[in-house]
Image: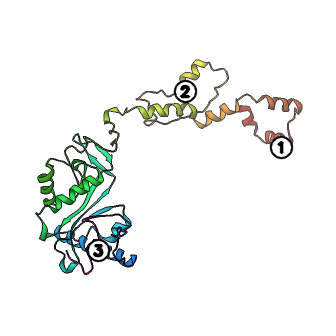
Amino acid sequence: MEFPFDVDALFPERITVLDQHLRPPARRPGTTTPARVDLQQQIMTIIDELGKASAKAQNLSAPITSASRMQSNRHVVYILKDSSGRPAGKGAIIGFIKVGYKKLFVLDDREAHNEVEPLCILDFYIHESVQRHGHGRELFQYMLQKERVEPHQLAIDRPSQKLLKFLNKHYNLETTVPQVNNFVIFEGFFAHQHPPARKLPPKRAEGDIKPYSSSDRECKRVWWLMPVIPAKAGRSPESRSSRTAWPTCSLGNSPERGPLRPFVPEQELLRSLRLCPPHPTARLLLAADPGGSPAQRRRTSSLPRSEESRY
């Protein structure tokens, strides 16, 4: 892939590594140095053109590699140049490979979810005119040595059939572990996992949930919600307990199946409230003022005789 500027002068080495800052590499001593802004613009042009060529070769609707994407993500791109042909003395670009670490949820051989952060192959392209000349293996091998990883530790994002055949031919990667996302991992990925895999807790089986657990929780609430009903004078404790049906903490008497409070007739509740013994403080007040307050005397005297005789 040719460009209108001097690629050989821009990239002194055969393989150049660029990060998200897209800084021009150090130049050789004795060479003229153009403006830094011009050099960075040339690098951005090369990355954009490589991304378009890779998307066309993979039949993608839009490029997945561009200078703007590189600047907004912590990815690394390895660019391979060809200085042998040197068309018009400017050099050419053979291809590139883009990698980066990503947090993924992947399945192992037992279909257990694992949260990992492996090095991922995000884009890989060699120009069609120089394929099958060993350039792809040279670039891929350089990346492995630089990143200090093994081929089976990689995760590949939506690999093409050409890339899968390339990995099978040069690195014997054939058996894949099925995933539910677009990434492909190979057998041996979990053998020497660099970060420890964090497994998600298994789901609780339906049989472990007790059907009466809700009634056990509500049982304690019922005893606090039960009203205290004083009994009539002269009634024995046995008769009071026989008339009041206190709930039990069994499945048959679950609070969800019945009312929380026993039904008490209104008239009986009023009678029981009138028969409640007065508070000791009220007794002292009545002893100090036998007649009571004028308002209380008026309320007492206003009651009909029939109502007073009833109680």
Of 51 and 244, the residue lying toward us: 51
Residue at the spot 26% in from the left edge and 74% down from the top edge: 7
Mark 3 vs 2, N-terminal side? 3
Which residue is outermost to the right? 288
Is 9 magenta? The answer is yes
Q: Which residue is mark 1?
A: 295
Of 112 and 221, the residue lying toward us: 112
Instruction: Kindly identify the amino acid type of the residue bearing the numbered disc 3.
Output: Ala
- Label 1 or label 3, whichever lies nearer to me, is 3
> Is disc 1 surrounded by few (<14), some (14 to 19) or many (20+) residues within 10 Å?
few
**The quarter of the displayed image where residue 188 is located:** top left
**Marker count (numbered):** 3
Whether residue 199 is visible to the viewer of this picture, yes or no, is no
- Residue 155's mark? none
Compute the Cα span from label 1 to label 3.
Answer: 109 Å
The secondary structure type at the circle numbered 2 is: loop
Mark 1 vs 3, N-terminal side? 3
The reply to whether the C-beta atoms of the residues labelled 3 and 2 are less than 8 Å apart is no
The secondary structure type at the circle numbered 1 is: helix
> Is disc 2 surrounded by few (<14), some (14 to 19) or many (20+) residues within 10 Å?
few
> Is disc 3 surrounded by few (<14), some (14 to 19) or many (20+) residues within 10 Å?
some
Q: Which residue is mark 2?
A: 244
- Label 1 or label 2, whichever lies nearer to me, is 2
- Residue 9's mark? 3
The span picked out in magenta is 1-18
**The quarter of the displayed image where residue 195 is located:** top left
Instruction: Kindly identify the amino acid type of the residue bearing the numbered disc 2.
Output: Thr
Whether residue 163 is visible to the viewer of this picture, yes or no, is yes
Residue 232, x across and y down, in percent: 65, 25
